[in-house]
Image: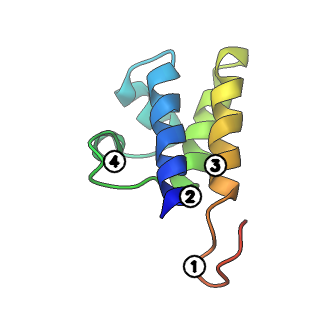
């Protein structure tokens, strides 16, 4: 699904732009570092929930990460919900 791929790409870009290690980003986002590694390895697509957690963590680091957080949130909104198939 193209929308999910765009979301995953946005999360990957955010991980690359983060001013910290992957482990620190995972800790700040409240997710497992192995989950972010799985996304990096394309073994797992990012979900809107994961994107929101990453975006929130990036926003905590201030203006440098605001652009990346906005891109992740915008990509997450374009993913259809499983129940209705509509965008969030």
Res. 82 mark: 1
3D distance between C-alphas at marks 1 and 4: 21 Å
Q: Nearer the viewer, residue 33 or 85?
A: 85
Q: Is residue 27 above or below residue 21?
A: below
Foreground label between 2 and 1:
2
Foreground label between 2 and 3:
2
The secondary structure type at the circle numbered 4 is helix
Name the residue located 30 percent from the left edge and 48 percent from the top edge: 42
Name the residue located 46 percent from the left edge and 29 percent from the top edge: 15
> Which residue has dot 4 on it?
35
Q: In the rendered structure, are the residues bearing label 1 and label 3 in contact, judged by CB atoms less than 8 Å apart? A: no
- Sequence-first tag of 2 and 3: 2
- Sequence-first tag of 1 and 4: 4
Q: Is residue 58 left or right of residue 15?
A: right
> Which residue has dot 3 on it?
75
The chosen color scheme is: rainbow
Q: Position of residue 32 (x, y in %)?
A: 35, 45
- Image quadrant in which the C terminus is located: bottom right
Q: In the rendered structure, are the residues bearing label 2 and label 3 in contact, judged by CB atoms less than 8 Å apart? A: yes
Q: Is residue 4 above or below residue 23?
A: below
The secondary structure type at the circle numbered 3 is helix
- Sequence-first tag of 2 and 1: 2
Q: Is residue 57 left or right of residue 38?
A: right
3D distance between C-alphas at marks 2 and 1: 13 Å
- Sequence-first tag of 4 and 2: 2
């Amino acid at each position: 699904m193209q929308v999910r791929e765009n979301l995953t790409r946005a999360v990957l870009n955010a991980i690359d732009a983060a001013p910290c290690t992957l482990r620190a980003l995972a800790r700040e986002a409240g997710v497992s570092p192995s989950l972010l590694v799985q996304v990096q390895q394309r073994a797992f697509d990012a979900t809107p929930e994961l994107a929101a957690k990453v975006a929130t963590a990036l926003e905590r680091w201030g203006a440098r990460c605001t652009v990346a957080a906005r891109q992740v949130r915008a990509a997450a909104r374009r993913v259809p919900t499983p129940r209705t198939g509509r965008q969030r």
